[in-house]
Amino acid sequence: MGLFSREKTIFVDSDILVIGGGMGGCGATYESRYWGRDLKIVCVEKANIERSGAVAQGLYAINCYMGMQWDENKPEDHVRYARNDLMGLVREDLGYDIARHVDSTVHKFEEWGLPMMKDPKTGRYLREGKWQIMIHGESYKPIVAEAARKAATEIYNRIMVTHLLMDAKRPKRVAGAVGFNVRTGDFYVFRAKAVIVAAGGASHIFRPRAVGEGMGRTWYAPWSSASAYALPILAGAKMTQMENRIVLARFKDGYGPVGAYFLHLKTYTQNAYGEEYESKWQDHTRQLVGDYVDHHPVPTCLRNHAFLEEVKAGRGPIRMVTKEAFQDPHKETVGWENFLGMTIGQAVVWASQNIDPKEINPELTTSEPYVMGSHATCSGAWASGPEDCAPADYQWGYNRMMTVDGLFGAGDTIGGSAHKFSSGSFTEGRIAAKAAVKYVNDMGNDQPQVSETEYENLKNAIYKPLENYKIGRNEIVGGTVSPSYLLPLHGLQRLEKIMDEYVGGISAHYTTNEPMLTRGIELLTMLKEDLAYLGAEDLHQLQRAWELQHRVLASECVTQHTLFRKETRWPGYYYRADHPKLDDKDWHCFTLSRYDRESGKWEMEKAPVHHIID
Ligand SMILES: Cc1cc2nc3c(=O)[nH]c(=O)nc-3n(C[C@H](O)[C@H](O)[C@H](O)COP(=O)(O)OP(=O)(O)OC[C@H]3O[C@@H](n4cnc5c(N)ncnc54)[C@H](O)[C@@H]3O)c2cc1C
């Protein structure tokens, strides 16, 4: 027992435990109740589901809607679109499964009160692009959260889940999770028959462009701290495509989105000298990736690639031409409202830098890399597919179950299926929940057992940073530097530096190679050793300490995958300088990893990409 282990232990039993109450988690909670009328459904969230997750501030568009009621698109079209954008590599079964159900999710959102913009002439949802529809999204998350709240037996806010629990009888089956209340410090043991992880993606694993007092200013939510990956990795689940990090071209410094600008306002980009530049790089890009560059739409990574090459050639900054569109008062209003609804910071940055987009074309930049499985990239856990359309290689039980029995996932957690966005993540939560209810019902009395030794050991480990701090705090050698402990912020900065310099971050122009990655892994291993000495002065810092633990493990996984894939599949996201070209002969495949927490070793393998849509 540790010196400071006076925290209360609270036990919570459930049939289905949902970890993370964002879009995927709210979808899972809602649907669990639909199929499991008498089941005990518990959702646990480290913030408050009312405003948690990546959509916390609101959105201006729902990015995944087929419009099947008006024959606008078919699910097959969306699979083709995502496959093209990901340079050929997607789990088509998973993508198809979401696309065929996503419209019904959006119709529910409208029924629940989400204000949708309508085309005054047709009465249809107002399209921003082929897949996007426009909403007044400030109330999006509270509306979705209300549905989850009404469906759940209990919602636990302010509890950070740190580890999954495994069945004492069958080590490859999940049995629940543990975590602590970030306000009271109480220790929670959640015992569950099935667990659905929907804990968002990972920001702040690579050094961000804004550092110091600006370090929270990233495109991706700074509170998305890789739990969605670390929890399954530690439980021995296979992960896929973790090298497929995302880099976004966004308005500089505020990271305001460009989608509505390109699609709705019809603005366009040019270099510092007012020239169109994308077409200039087409031949050069074709030599790297073949005819992918001629596809329509041009894959997102290749558009980034042209941007990066133009800047490297000394013709930056790249600017968005807003001056023309903003002469139209309607477009000007839409341009500003777009930010006020979801990225208020961009409007503030422009005001503070004397940028009026009617007078000045604002600069764009490329972000540091993030890891997420629901946006334009597809990192995440390797999951079983739908019974009716997944090829045999992709099916080993229940839909969206990982390679650990009883462990399901949704949204950013699940790999191989990009372009789900908010509506697709909610839909995937619903799909996972339906399968989890079936799993629980099929299990009958064969319930998992939680071992007291396991959760007591975890309790000691979880609160250790508080103990480290209390013991070591008088040995400070200067400012916050102590010989006895490492503060979470210092650990985070060390992680970001390693990832930035060795694994293809901004300072390395997103470029790496085998020697760099090998050294990166050595440095990450040393960092992992030092995490035993994390010091936390209060519960807030304890949360930071565990967020760091999750980020480090996910980063190690990203590095192992990047080392394994010996090609540059997505120029513009990252470059393997020692394998600069796309190599369809050897690498038209998924990369899979499995971590062994006893030995600390990673096993890597390839899995085939099956094309089920022509
Ligand atoms: C900047 C940005 C802009 C976007 N714009 C759009 C858009 O315009 N349209 C659109 O449709 N989609 C958009 N998306 C995508 C959309 O937000 C995501 O696809 C969606 O939120 C993913 O759902 P999720 O449930 O996987 O993650 P999230 O919604 O992020 O939810 C994860 C939840 O898990 C919780 N959590 C994390 N760790 C733990 C832990 N250890 N213990 C307990 N709880 C935990 C978090 O607090 C959070 O509530 C955008 C995303 C970003 C980042």
Image (cartoon, rainbow, N blue to C red):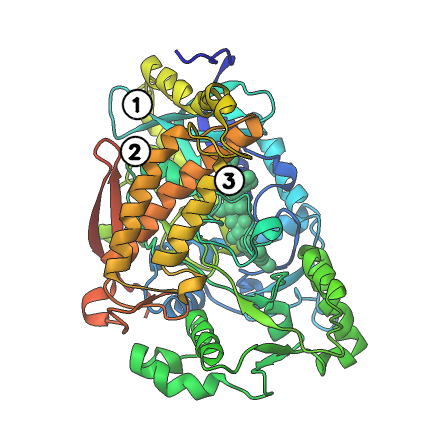
Considering the image in quadrants, where does the N terminus appear?
top left
N-term-proximal mark, 2 vs 1: 1
For the residues labelled 2 and 3, the Cα–Cα distance comes to 35 Å
In front here: 260 or 42?
260
Q: Which residue is mark 3?
A: 489
Image location of residue 391, percent across then percent down: 25, 54
**Few, some or many residues within 10 Å of mark 3 (<14, 14–19, 20+):** some
Residue drawn at x 72%, y 54% as measured from the top left = 115
Q: Which residue is mark 1?
A: 167
Q: Are marks 1 and 3 in contact (CB under 8 Å)?
A: no
Find residue 362 and name its label: none
In front here: 209 or 43?
209
Q: Are marks 2 and 1 in contact (CB under 8 Å)?
A: yes
Quadrant assignment, res 454: top left
Q: Farthest right residue?
A: 329
N-term-proximal mark, 1 vs 3: 1
Considering the image in quadrants, where does the C terminus appear?
bottom left
Select label 2 or label 1 by which is in front.
1
Find residue 405 and name its label: 2
For the residues labelled 1 and 3, the Cα–Cα distance comes to 34 Å
For the residues labelled 2 and 1, the Cα–Cα distance comes to 10 Å
Reply above or below: 259 against 388: below
Residue at disc 3, secondary structure: helix
N-term-proximal mark, 2 vs 3: 2
Q: Is residue 160 left or right of residue 584?
A: right
Give the amino acid at mark 3.
Answer: Leu
